[in-house]
Amino acid sequence: SSYGGRYDKFGGSRGGDYGRRSGSKDRSFGSRDEKFKPISKENEPVPFEKNFYVPTKTLNQEEADRLRREASMRLTGKDINLPVNDFESLGFPQAVVDNFRRKGYTAPTPIQAQGWPMALSGRDMVGIADTGSGKTISFALPALIHAAAQTPLRENDGPIVLILAPTRELCNQIEEVVAEYASFFNMRSVAVFGGAPIVPQKRAIVRGTEILVATPGRLIDLHEQGFCPLGRVTFLVLDEADRMLDMGFEPQLQQIIPKTHPDRQTLMWSATWPREVRRLAADFMKDFIQVTIGDDSLKANAKITQKVEVVHWQDKKNKLLSYLKDRSHDKIIVFCNMKKTCDIIESFLIENGYNGAAIHGDKTQSARDAVINAFKNGRRNILIATDVAARGLDVKDVK
């Protein structure tokens, strides 16, 4: 009635406690960690499974059509599995369902309701939905199910699941979600990105990690130095694919993807579906299916009230203060088009008694992490940012 014994050996159905943070030490390859040398030759490939779609129940066609219509959902491709409307229908471990309940989730979001059956089918897929719609868990759970069902990692193996994201902050955010559920499957995860020390990242991969979340540049560094073989990657995720292409990562993606297993499952997630992303999908995906929630073009969020005021540049600071005057405790994001402007506005707001902090690409990774965490937990209520924070970050209660 679920995925049977495929991942039970990893403790998945028992809610094991061997995730990256708690159990990787017990299952590491000791000799590799002690020598800590690059891998001179990749292991031979192993057989793997891709299809884990074993529903206990599904909606009927009439119910599915109603859900898709109400969610403004469009599908592309043939033989797409019907959506679900609860957490129990796909045979997730009870510990996962219980965790959903503890977090107050009552039903899947539209992208999850349709995305889970598609991702678990083993087929290449594209998911288009707004940031904040639940995309991360839409691919994180199928990724963990896929990894847990495969032959355990051998010495000198790289990851089974590779999740690529455009920014360090998004990498961290994705890995936090993966790590939260990895313990239920006895899987390990790690995030690697530039701006952070590379040696601990090398060590984590050498010791063995099934799920790797990475920015393209740092992943190439690790691979070229011999610390991250990619031949075992059979589940590849490109998150915020449009943003990655906007940031000029296409050459890196063209370099990375062919090094993964040729029969891998590839999933691409994005907020928009421009020509460049379509071309990337055509290059690296086979007979893919697609779900789109709402519009796939770049447009203003209908849930946000947009106001435009044209002012002289010398009046901008005073105008900003007038906006903030009655919002001293609200969570607010101020976007700037230059890094130096972020720093200037940060100093200006602090001088005027406001609790702001700036984030941009010239900040160290530890400084960026500290600012994001302070903004999320409310210690700082104003975030001044370049477009490094424009996509993918999940911060509650921004007014």
Image (tube, rainbow, N blue to C red):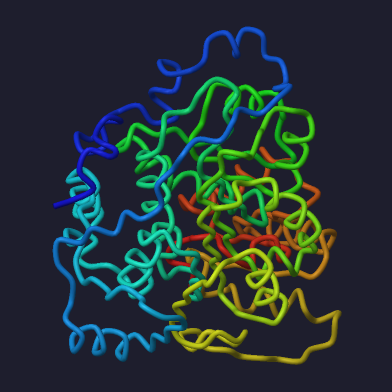
Q: Position of residue 277 (x, y in %)?
A: 67, 74
**Left or right: residue 124 compared with residue 186:** right
Residue occupying image coordinates x 64% and y 62%: 389
| Residue that appears at 53% across and 10% down | 30
> Which residue is at the front of the view, 190 or 311?
190
Residue at 79% over, 70% down: 337
Judge from the rendering whether residue 188 lies leftward or rightward of residue 352; answer left or right.
Answer: left
Q: With 234 as the anchor, is 88 left or right in this view? A: left
Rendered view: 43 above or below 373 = above
- The residue nearer to you, when weighing 194 against 187, is 187
Indicate the position of residue 335 as horizontal and vertical percent values.
69, 70
Residue 252, position as x, y percentages in the image: 77, 54
As drawn, is 323 to the left or to the right of 336? left
Figure disc tally: 0
Residue 103 location, x and y as percent? Answer: 25, 54
Q: Quadrant of residue 87?
A: bottom left
Residue at the location (18% across, 85% down)?
Answer: 63
Up the image or down, 212 lies above or below 100; here it is above
Q: Nearer the viewer, residue 386 or 278?
A: 278
